[in-house]
Amino acid sequence: MAENPKDGLTHFDAGGRPRMVDVSAKTPTMRMARASGFVRMSDAALDLVRERASKKGDPAAAAELAGVMGAKRTADLIPLCHPLSLSAVNVDASVDAGNGGVSVTASVKTTGPTGVEMEALTAVTVACLTLYDMLKAIDKEMTIEDIALMEKTGGVSGNYKRNDS
């Protein structure tokens, strides 16, 4: 008999149905996660980010604010995520002219029974989408690339750092 691919996945019960993991018995610890992503764009769009001005306003500032808001709403977007009280969310959208775009990073912290990886990834994703929205009138061919968890600390599974970070 083939091994059940859901074995070992905590978001499924014994019958294979999705569930929110019970973290009530877990000890709260300090947890941090850092994620990154990249929006590749034309020189014209990149100039607007560099100048911090477009018809809609400052694309980088809007993206950073949207990323913070996205982190705070992760549980509303990802069905099995726990709503968390976040201690800190920092989002940075920086011009990376050498690679032809904007590098986005997010760092999220909490003290709680579960990690903030999804919040960091959501912050980056929402920030990248906001850059696209702010600049799509100039460049509809932008691409959102390489969204990844770069690092996490805390919890039973311990620390993680991506090899290429």
Image (cartoon, rainbow, N blue to C red):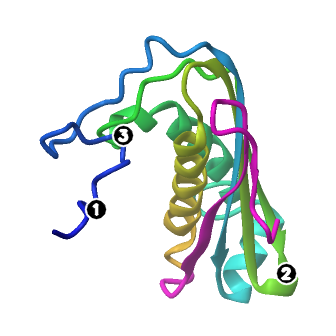
The number of numbered discs placed on residues in the rendered structure image is: 3
* Residue lying at 35% horizontally and 43% vertically, measured from the top left: 78
Packing grade of label 2 (10 A; few <14, some 14-19, many >=20) is some
Of labels 1 and 2, the one closer to you? 1
In the image, residue 79 sits, relative to residue 31, either above or below, namely below
Q: What residue type is labelled 1?
A: Pro
Residue 8 visible within the image: yes
Packing grade of label 3 (10 A; few <14, some 14-19, many >=20) is few
Mark 3 / mark 2, whichever is N-terminal: 3
Q: Are marks 3 and 1 in contact (CB under 8 Å)?
A: no
Which residue range is magenta in the image?
138-165
Q: Is mark 1 on a helix, strand or loop?
A: loop
Reply yes or no: does residue 59 show up in magenta: no
Of labels 3 and 2, the one closer to you? 3
**Which of 64/155 is in front?**
155
Residue position for label 3: 10
**Gap between marks 3 and 1, in whole Å?**
12 Å
In the image, residue 94 sits, relative to residue 47, either above or below, namely above
Mark 3 / mark 1, whichever is N-terminal: 1
Give the quadrant of the N terminus.
bottom left
Q: Which amino acid does label 3 sit on?
A: Thr
Task: Tell me the tag on residue 97.
Answer: 2
Give the quadrant of the C terminus.
bottom right
Image spot of residue 17 (x, y percent): 15, 42
Image spot of residue 117 (x, y percent): 59, 43
Residue position for label 1: 5
